Amino acid sequence: MNTKPQSQGERLLWLIRALLAEDPRYQGLAIPDDPEGQWHLYRALANVRPPRPVSDEYLRIQDAYLQNLLCERGMADYRELEPRAPHLYLWQGDITTLAVDAIVNAANSQMLGCFYPNHGCIDNAIHTFAGVELRLACAELMAKQGHEEPTGHAKVTPAFNLPSRFVIHTVGPVVRGAPTPTDRALLASCYLSCLDAAAERGLASIAFCCVSTGEFGYPHVEAAEVAIATVGEWRQAHGDAAKPIDVVFNVFKDDDYAIYERLL
């Protein structure tokens, strides 16, 4: 295996071969010839990799690859946005490219990331572009805790290769049908827990994804209403804070952007 890959293509192939070599079940698995196929294979292998130690050499090559990939994808700085209200922003885009103190990840109760290869959820994307150290950091927190993460709570990890400094992982309620008062209270608790965690660390900014929507089934309009109302209530309760926290509502789909734009 080439230990000194120079180009992005060489780094990607090095990482794929390193991940394949970790598991005897992958012996004989063909590596696609095209860059897109190689990327999907790399992402799939990283997605299913359990939280176990990795060599310093792997981390050096992975970090170089992901940092260069971030440059290629482009990075957005929330401070360039026009606030919708004091310390309140709305941004449409990929949260893994947003420069902010902390981004919020819609996690599951295992808090280890999405293990489904190339899945489209935000949990998968955040772990993919942060690198394998993120799952290791989450596993350490969960091992220390000794049980699954309760709904409405939050955990903080470094962001590793993301442009943010931290990732705040929160477990939202799973909703099937109309949200109940308990569902609304649990979703509000997600936002409160994340804001409390950011304040405890003295962070100046936080970006929320649309927690509990999508795979978890919370209706988008009702989820946005809870998000905006809860952030407002938290601000009122912390009105005397010396350092207000900038809050970014991050959306990816046009429909969600329209919802937040109307509610804000």
Image: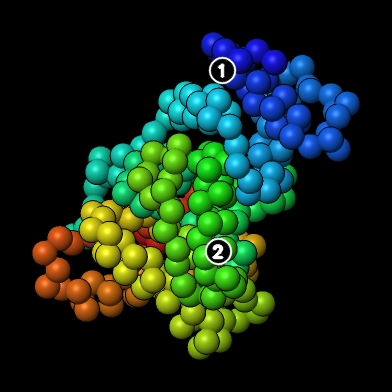
Q: Outermost residue toward the right? A: 28
* Sequence-first tag of 2 and 1: 1
Q: Going by the image, does 95 lie left or right of 237?
A: right
**Element marked by disc 1:** helix
Q: Quadrant of residue 233?
A: bottom left
- Residue at position x 77%, y 17% in the image: 33
Q: Position of residue 46 (x, y in %)?
A: 66, 39
Q: CA distance from mark 2 to mark 1?
A: 34 Å
- Residue at position x 31%, y 49% in the image: 101
Q: Position of residue 228 (x, y in %)?
A: 35, 69
Label 1 crowding class (10 Å Cα cut-off): few <14, some 14-19, many 20+?
A: some
Above or below for 29 versus 138: above
Q: Nearer the viewer, residue 137 or 203?
A: 137
Residue 122 seen in the current view: no
Above or below for 129 versus 249: above
Where is mark 2, residue-wise? Answer: 142
Where is mark 1, residue-wise? Answer: 8
Q: Outermost residue toward the bottom? A: 181
* Nearer mark to the viewer, of 2 and 1: 2
Q: Nearer the viewer, residue 149 or 87?
A: 149
Three-letter code, disc 2:
Met
Three-letter code, disc 1:
Gln
Label 2 crowding class (10 Å Cα cut-off): few <14, some 14-19, many 20+?
A: some
Q: Quadrant of residue 32?
A: top right
Q: Nearer the viewer, residue 235 or 61?
A: 61
- Residue at position x 12%, y 73% in the image: 240
**Element marked by disc 2:** helix
